[in-house]
């Protein structure tokens, strides 16, 4: 017994030493990494000052966060005991949340009345990226399939609309359905051979597909006009009224964003959404209970590419010009960053992530030299301290109802 007690004391002492070492080393490593990134721009003196300052700030932050965690745990115990007593008497009020949503909606709708044209233009671009990010969220967040070439479907939608409009004279409402169908069909064609692979190998195949599409657009001069791009694209018309003005197009994009969020959410709450989450969590178990994993993954690729094609057509109609430079690999990285920042599988989180990553670089444009450094550093710190993203997705069982079943009347209910 004495030997066991001595061993347990030694083990506890070792664990304590490891925690203390991690408490010291982690802030130092983060500060050193950021200082090394800063070094080429300002020299060793400023980098050293930054290293010392960040180390001190991170130490303080970690100490305060540990203290705050203890207080939060105590507060949660008190809150749970109080709320359990009141839960049977009072229902949870929903009015404040409804009022908050109403105020947010009012602000969004009133932006063109007080904002400058530049800010409205940035918000239009943010809306297009929200549609893009929701499409990728279906593939990566719901189904768990890493796609590094998602920008290819964005490009296919944009160029399809541009060619249908300039070469064949089709208007927006005629060219848009064809563009999204072509993009969705491209996603299906890519998925057929690619889904034989998993994980990193699937990511490499999708990355290669994205580069193939970009090279084709850059070199097929007779159709895409190569690096010069396609110009002269007409803006969309609504009841014979051109939507070329920023205010009109802002509301136009807002309507498409609302449609995208509604459709993605409906699919996520359906049996298909449950199947995607089940495949993401354990594909072998999903297959063993009768889920056609191949069919659902094909549907995820096609459905995600559908919204990428819609975003591409909206982008082409907005800019009235497309070129291969708008569809590089870095665009895929940016869209994936939006999904990761907001939270994989979280619909409101992806909206927030897209808006942040479009608006924040514009706000930092005055510090042109450091804005991408600041943005990248912020993303790294977020992944360290909050790897689940800004919004943690709720359980799928809560969204779709505990009483629903995956396989019609029989089967198993899956929770994310």
Image (spheres, rainbow, N blue to C red):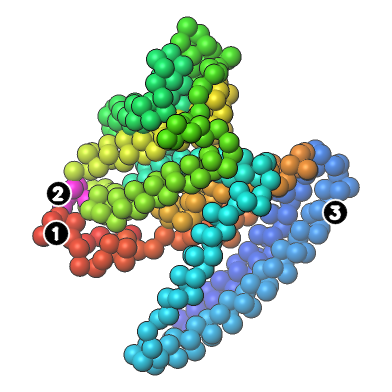
Residue 258 percent coordinates (x, y): 42, 49
| 163 vs 36: above or below | above
Q: Looking at the image, is mark 2 or mark 3 earlier in the sequence?
A: 3
Regarding residue 88, the answer to whether it shows in the image is: yes
Specify the label residue 74 is tagged with. Answer: none
Closest to the observer, 108 or 356: 108
Q: Which residues are magenta?
A: 286-291
CB under 8 Å between callouts 2 and 1? yes
Regarding residue 207, the answer to whether it shows in the image is: no
Residue 93 percent coordinates (x, y): 43, 80
Closest to the observer, 285 or 95: 95
Q: Is residue 237 magenta?
A: no
Badge 2 is on which residue? 290
| 251 vs 9: above or below | above
Q: Looking at the image, is mark 2 or mark 1 earlier in the sequence?
A: 2
Q: Looking at the image, is mark 1 or mark 3 earlier in the sequence?
A: 3
Closest to the observer, 363 or 29: 363
Please, what secondary structure does the residue beneath circle 2 have? loop
To which quarter of the image does residue 68 belong?
Answer: bottom right
Which residue corresponds to the image point at 81% horizontal and 53% vertical from the top-left?
A: 50
User: In 3D space, how far apart are the residues under numbered discs 1 and 3 (Cα atoms)?
Assistant: 61 Å
Which residue corresponds to the image point at 46% horizontal and 81% vertical from the top-left?
A: 4
Specify the label residue 411 is tagged with. Answer: 1
Closest to the observer, 342 or 174: 174
Residue 30 relative to residue 259: left or right: right
User: In 3D space, how far apart are the residues under numbered discs 2 and 1 (Cα atoms)?
Assistant: 9 Å
CB under 8 Å between callouts 1 and 3? no
Badge 3 is on which residue? 49
């Amino acid at each position: 017994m004495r030997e066991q007690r001595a061993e347990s004391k030694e083990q506890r002492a070792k664990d304590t030493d490891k925690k203390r070492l991690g408490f010291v080393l982690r802030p130092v490593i983060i500060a050193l990494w950021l200082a090394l990134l800063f070094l080429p721009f300002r020299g060793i003196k400023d980098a050293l000052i930054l290293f010392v300052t960040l180390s001190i700030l991170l130490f303080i932050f970690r100490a305060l966060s540990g203290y705050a965690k203890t207080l939060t745990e105590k507060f949660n115990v008190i809150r749970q005991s109080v709320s359990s007593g009141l839960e049977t008497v009072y229902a949870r009020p929903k009015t404040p949340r409804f009022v908050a949503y109403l105020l947010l909606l009012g602000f969004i709708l009133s932006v063109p009345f007080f904002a400058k044209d530049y800010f409205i233009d940035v918000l239009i671009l943010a809306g297009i990226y929200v549609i893009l990010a929701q499409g990728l969220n279906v593939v990566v967040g719901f189904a768990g399939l890493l796609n590094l070439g998602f920008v290819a479907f964005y490009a296919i939608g944009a160029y399809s609309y541009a060619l249908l409009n300039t070469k064949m004279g089709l208007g927006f409402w005629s060219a848009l359905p064809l563009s999204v169908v072509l993009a969705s069909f491209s996603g299906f064609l890519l998925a057929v051979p690619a889904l034989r692979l998993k994980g990193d190998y699937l990511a490499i195949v999708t990355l290669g597909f994205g580069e193939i599409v970009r090279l084709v657009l850059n070199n097929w001069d007779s159709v895409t006009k190569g690096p010069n791009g396609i110009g002269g694209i007409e803006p969309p018309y609504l009841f014979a009224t051109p939507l070329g003005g920023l205010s009109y197009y802002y509301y136009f994009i807002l309507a498409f964003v609302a449609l995208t969020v509604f459709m993605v959410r409906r699919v996520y709450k359906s049996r298909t959404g449950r199947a995607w989450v089940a495949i993401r969590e354990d594909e072998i178990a999903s297959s063993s209970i009768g889920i056609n994993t191949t069919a659902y993954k094909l549907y995820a690729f096609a459905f995600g590419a559908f919204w990428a094609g819609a975003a591409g057509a909206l982008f082409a109609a907005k800019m009235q010009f497309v070129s291969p430079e708008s569809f590089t690999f870095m665009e895929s990285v940016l869209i994936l960053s939006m999904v990761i920042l907001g939270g994989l599988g979280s619909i409101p989180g992806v909206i927030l992530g897209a808006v942040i990553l479009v608006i924040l670089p514009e706000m930092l444009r005055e510090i042109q030299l450091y804005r991408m450094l600041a943005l990248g550093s912020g993303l790294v710190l977020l992944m360290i301290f909050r790897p689940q993203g800004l919004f943690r997705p709720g359980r799928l069982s809560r969204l779709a109802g505990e009483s629903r079943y995956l396989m019609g009347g029989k089967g198993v209910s899956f929770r994310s």
